[in-house]
Amino acid sequence: MYIERVLVVNDEPGVRKSLEEMVRQHRRSVLSVETRKAAETALSKDVFDLVFLSSHLSDGEGKDVLKYLSDLPAVTIKPLVVIVSGYNSVPSAVEAIKAGAFDYILKPFSLQEIEGVLKKAETYRQLKDVNQFFSVHKDADTELLGESDAMQRVRELIRKVAPTAATVLITGENGTGKEVVAREIFRQSRLIDKPFLAVNCAAIAENLMESEFFGHEKGAFTNATARRPGRFELADGGVLFLDEIAEISPHLQPKLLRVLQEKSFERVGGTRTVTVNVRLIAATNRDLKRLMKEGKFREDLYYRLNVFPIHIPPLRERKTDIMPMAEIFLERCMKKYDAKLKGFSDDAKQLLTAYRWPGNVRELQNTIERAVLLSNGAPYITPAVLNISTVSDMILRDEDLKKPEVVSTVSLDYVEKQHILHILKITRGNCTRAAKLLNITTRTLYNKLKAYSKTVREFKHINMEE
């Protein structure tokens, strides 16, 4: 609830009492004062979210209180001001709007009008807070790439769950695109015009996590100089995406469970229960079932989160996605850096497809961007600028050998070539030493290099640890 504390400033007893009663009917806390001086005293001692301010007071004008608010330090959270005016003083109300008032109402007013003002003020305050959040939290790339069977299954799951209110748990390795999937669920949902907030739980210090999630009251701890809404309040009515959910500390897990069950919580240092309506999407790269067995993750919280699971396979298990995605990233980078390239060399294509991509899509994107920057006017992206051809990268694990779609992309000739070139990098072009390590003759090594269109000179000055 963004409007909790309301100050009524009016020197007409009937109007003041009427406003008090109407605001209290909407379960807001109200303080009433009669004069400009009393209003300024109250504003200096307490935090208010909204002020109903008379345009004329016995000891001054409403605009005097507006000026007092505008002169407060910039770090002070200032209330929204609604001018209460009579029909014969509309010009002064308009002048107050120009001076910084949020809105104005005319006497006599109805309960429905006050309700409308409160809703308008709450919507405005939430949008303002969300916009401030996004000013330092830029959106990630929201395009879901990949046309493999695995990604088509992910898309089908998104289509099924997006229109619902179900909680979603997205699993997958780092760099697979878990946040992209969360944003796609949001894009296809009925909440597209509501807030979407993404929070990386691993990036928040444990002692600050509760305040980040649920907000805090003024004075709750050192440096808590004003009431601050948490992520759940900011996302009220919309979607909250909690990435790396496994990093939530054990003492906070029961509070998260309560929000999922009861849609309510208390701010740090507060006693007032805040009610929210937030759709939660969580993601993790860890095995939550194993963490449950180890006592590090609550079982009841796991089942609350795992209502609708979506798993994103790693890039090495969907080889057919690699080159189409690489082509898309190449086109984007050429536009970004005004580079003119014809594409990838055949060797580069083989290397990109054979590489294991431990960093998944994020690593692929970064690799292509770096290669474009290193291309130096060359017509094609080559293995030399990709800088990913190491022997360890070419070794297939036992689980990979069970996947024909993985094994079929790596030819024996290609593995041999990459191994030979890697050994030459290690020896910095010393063919005698390289041949000895490879257990072949120097002549055979030179013949291989000739077939690869390579020369020993290319490896002489490579700075690589042996």
Image (tube, grey):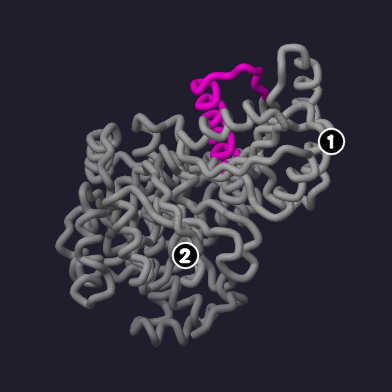
- 403 relative to 238, above or below: below
Quickly name the residue at label 1. 59
- Residue 258 part of the magenta segment: no
- The residue at the point 62 percent across, 76 percent down is 461
- Magenta-tinted stretch: 104-130
Q: How far is the residue under mark 1 from the one under mark 2?
A: 46 Å
Q: Work out whether residue 414 can be spotted.
A: no
Residue at the far front: name it.
13
Q: Is residue 118 magenta?
A: yes
Q: Which mark is residue 460?
A: none
Q: Residues within 10 Å of mark 2 (few under 14, many from 20)?
A: some
Is residue 141 found left or right of 248 in the rendered image?
A: right
Question: Can see residue 370?
Answer: yes
Q: Is residue 206 left or right of residue 84?
A: left
> What secondary structure is found at the residue carrying circle 2?
helix
Q: Residue 427: x and y, percent?
A: 50, 82
Horizontal relation, residue 291 to residue 269: left or right: left
- 10 Å crowding of disc 1: few (<14), some (14-19), many (20+): few
Q: At 45% across and 64% down in the image, what residue appears?
A: 210
Residue 440 x, y percent position in the rendering: 35, 81
Q: x, y percentage for residue 269?
A: 50, 64
Residue shown at 48% from the left, 76% from the top: 424
Q: Nearer the viewer, residue 458 or 32?
A: 32
Closer mark to the observer between disc 1 and disc 2: 1
Q: Main secondary structure of the magenta part?
A: helix
Position above or below: 414 against 329? below
- Going by the numbered disc 2, the residue's amino acid type is Met
Q: How many marks?
A: 2
Q: Which circle's residue, 1 or 2, is located before the other in the chain?
A: 1
Secondary structure, mark 1, is loop
- Residue that badge 2 annotates: 209
Residues marked 1 and 2 touching at CB (< 8 Å):
no
